[in-house]
């Protein structure tokens, strides 16, 4: 069997090896163009349709310019579709400087259940053609089917993969905010850590418009020292707290002693990708993105998966499960 033959149904052995070595993996053409178009059309519809009149004008802040986002509109968004503004969409006196559809930083966090096109990406029964299955017998269609999120999650070793949040991130032209280096397990903590990000480019992501960049291998040596949690002692909002639980997933490959060479000061690698590409991101991997000051937007869709079997989801996490529990990934 060639090393390119998928042995796990979702990733080839060489893709899996790359992910384990680097902590991220780019899968080009994971979505066919028709699906990218459908998800972009839904995104634009959502941006056009939401109402400003009852919106609390919550801005998405990563904490660089103002406190990290943490109001009720944010904290109760886990089972809703809500809209968070770019920090730079406002004048100093709070006036919106852009049309609303050009001012939103992100839409979240329950698209994967409440928006039919995004829900169909996780549950192929809702739309069998979404990942190209049945549209042709060529290798491209086969590749799309192999890229089904459930198959990919199984290939990564998940036993009970659960999608717990989803977001469209717009990275608007001229005002798209930077995201400083971080690890996703800080925000979506399980004991032990298990989060993996699925990140789909719906438009080309380039150095010019603020693509992601990654510190390869940092998932093996960078511990999750901090957690983003609901504020303690009955206070409202969110806070960062020291992580008293496990700081790595279970495995001999993980540990602070695994750091070689330049470590945290090493070179970030740009993740420039075409629309339709999927990037998998390990929850311990250090990654970031720069501002988008260009005239081109950079709309992407991302959701995160955690292990539902044998892990504990923490009650202090900012995001708490909806009444029906986190969404199971269903195999194509
Ligand atoms: Fe991230």
Image (cartoon, rainbow, N blue to C red):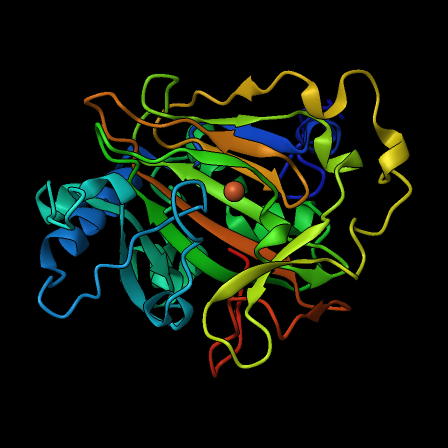
Judged left or right of residue 274, residue 142 is right
Q: How many numbered circles are shown?
A: 0
Q: Is residue 298 above or below residue 234?
A: above
Corner quadrant of residue 221? top right
Judged left or right of residue 217, residue 118 is left
Corner quadrant of residue 33? top left
- Residue 208, image x, y percentages: 33, 17
- Residue 272, image x, y percentages: 44, 20
Q: Is residue 1 above or below residue 153?
A: above
Judged left or right of residue 15, residue 256 is right
Corner quadrant of residue 315? bottom right
Which residue sits at x=75%, y=28%?
21
| Residue closest to the eye, 317 or 65 | 65
- Residue 124, image x, y percentages: 42, 58
Which residue sits at x=39%, y=42%?
65
Look at the image and tell me in which quarter the N terminus lies. Answer: top right
| Residue closest to the eye, 204 or 54 | 54
| Residue 233 visible here | yes
| Residue 163 visible here | no
């Amino acid at each position: 069997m060639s090393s390119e033959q998928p042995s796990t149904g979702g990733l080839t052995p060489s893709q899996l090896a790359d992910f384990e070595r680097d902590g991220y993996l780019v899968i080009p053409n994971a979505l066919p163009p028709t699906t990218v178009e459908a998800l972009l059309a839904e995104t634009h519809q959502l941006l056009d349709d939401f109402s400003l009149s009852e919106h609390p004008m919550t801005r998405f802040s990563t904490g660089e310019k103002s406190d990290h986002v943490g109001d009720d509109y944010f904290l109760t968004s886990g089972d809703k579709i809500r809209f968070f503004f770019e920090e730079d969409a406002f004048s100093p006196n709070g006036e919106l400087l852009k049309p609303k559809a050009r001012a939103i930083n992100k839409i979240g966090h329950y698209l994967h259940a409440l928006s039919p096109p995004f829900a169909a990406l996780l549950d192929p029964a809702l739309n069998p053609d979404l990942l190209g299955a049945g549209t042709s017998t060529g290798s491209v269609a086969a590749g799309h089917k192999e890229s089904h999120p459930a198959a990919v999650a199984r290939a990564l070793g998940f036993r009970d993969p659960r999608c717990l949040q989803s977001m469209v991130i717009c990275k608007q032209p001229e005002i798209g905010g930077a995201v400083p280096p971080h690890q996703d397990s800080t925000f979506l903590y399980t004991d032990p850590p298990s989060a993996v990000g699925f990140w789909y480019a719906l438009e080309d992501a380039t150095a010019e418009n603020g693509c992601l960049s990654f510190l390869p291998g940092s998932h093996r040596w960078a511990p999750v020292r901090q957690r983003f949690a609901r504020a303690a002692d009955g206070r409202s909002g969110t806070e960062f707290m020291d992580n008293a639980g496990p700081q790595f997933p279970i495995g001999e490959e993980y540990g602070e002693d695994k750091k070689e060479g330049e470590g945290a000061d090493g070179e970030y690698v740009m993740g420039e990708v075409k629309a339709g590409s999927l990037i998998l991101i390990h929850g311990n991997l250090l990654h970031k993105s720069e501002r988008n000051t260009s005239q081109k937007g950079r709309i992407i869709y991302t959701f995160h998966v955690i292990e539902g079997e044998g892990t504990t989801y923490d009650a202090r996490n900012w995001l708490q499960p909806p009444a029906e529990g986190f969404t199971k990934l269903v195999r194509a």
